[in-house]
Image (cartoon, helix red, strand yellow):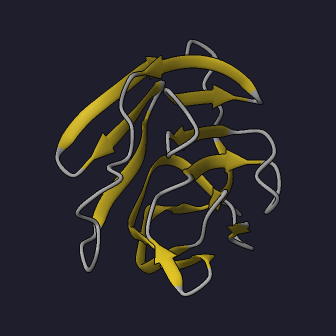
């Protein structure tokens, strides 16, 4: 599931998302809460999440958090989303672009950075998940609307 902005943003940008796993049926009368991969993207070509800078925070079925540029992996780190203790708790994820530097944050800790010599300048903001539902009470976008 992905959702993107209609507006495009240019220059320096931040997208900050608070997220928690949604309680999902696990068979019978059982339910579970676990994160699948969670996505944030800047400078995307479309609301479908293609192109741009996309970070895939590793969930239950992934080993690494991955940063992609135009669909190609440019950086990775061993960070994985927590899979326990998330009931009624939130996680703050951020993707930041400052000039040619792209950085990925969890709360106030930077987990990854990439210096792009041919930095993308503008595009849409996209967020989403794979293999699970998520709850997103707040998304904040800092940036200049592209005209």
Query: Which residue is at 29% across, 62% downward?
Result: 91
In this image, 27 relative to 95: left or right? right
Q: Is residue 22 visible?
A: no
Query: Which residue is at 76% across, 52% downward?
Result: 49
Q: Is residue 3 visible?
A: yes
In this image, 68 relative to 139: left or right? right
Dividing the picture into quadrants, the one containing residue 101 is: top left
Front residue (pair 84, 76): 84
Q: Hey, which residue is sitting farthest bottom in the picture?
A: 29
Front residue (pair 96, 143): 96
Query: In the rendered view of the protein, which quadrant contains the N terminus?
Result: bottom right
In this rendering, the answer to whether 102 lies above or below 129 is above
Query: Which residue is at 25% across, 34% downward?
Result: 110
Front residue (pair 135, 106): 135
Q: Hey, which residue is sitting farthest top in the picture?
A: 117
Q: Measured from the top left, where is residue 95 in percent x and y?
A: 43, 46
Query: In the rendered view of the protein, which quadrant contains the C terminus?
Result: bottom right
Query: Which residue is at 79% across, 63% downward?
Result: 47
In this rendering, the answer to whether 112 lies above or below 88 is above
Q: Measured from the top left, where is residue 117 in percent x and y?
A: 57, 12
């Amino acid at each position: 599931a992905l959702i993107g902005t209609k507006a495009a943003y240019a220059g320096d940008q931040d997208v900050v998302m608070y997220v928690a796993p949604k309680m999902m049926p696990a068979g019978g009368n059982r339910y579970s809460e676990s994160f699948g991969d969670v996505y944030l993207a800047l400078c995307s070509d479309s609301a479908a999440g293609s192109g741009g800078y996309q970070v895939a925070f590793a969930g239950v079925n992934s080993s690494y958090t991955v940063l992609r540029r135009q669909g190609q992996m440019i950086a990775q780190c061993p960070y994985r989303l927590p899979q326990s203790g998330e009931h009624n708790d939130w996680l703050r994820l951020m993707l930041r672009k400052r000039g040619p530097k792209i950085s990925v944050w969890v709360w106030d800790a930077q987990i990854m950075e990439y210096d792009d010599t041919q930095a993308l300048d503008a595009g849409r903001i996209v967020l989403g998940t794979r293999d699970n539902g998520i709850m997103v009470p707040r998304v904040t976008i800092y940036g200049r609307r592209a005209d």
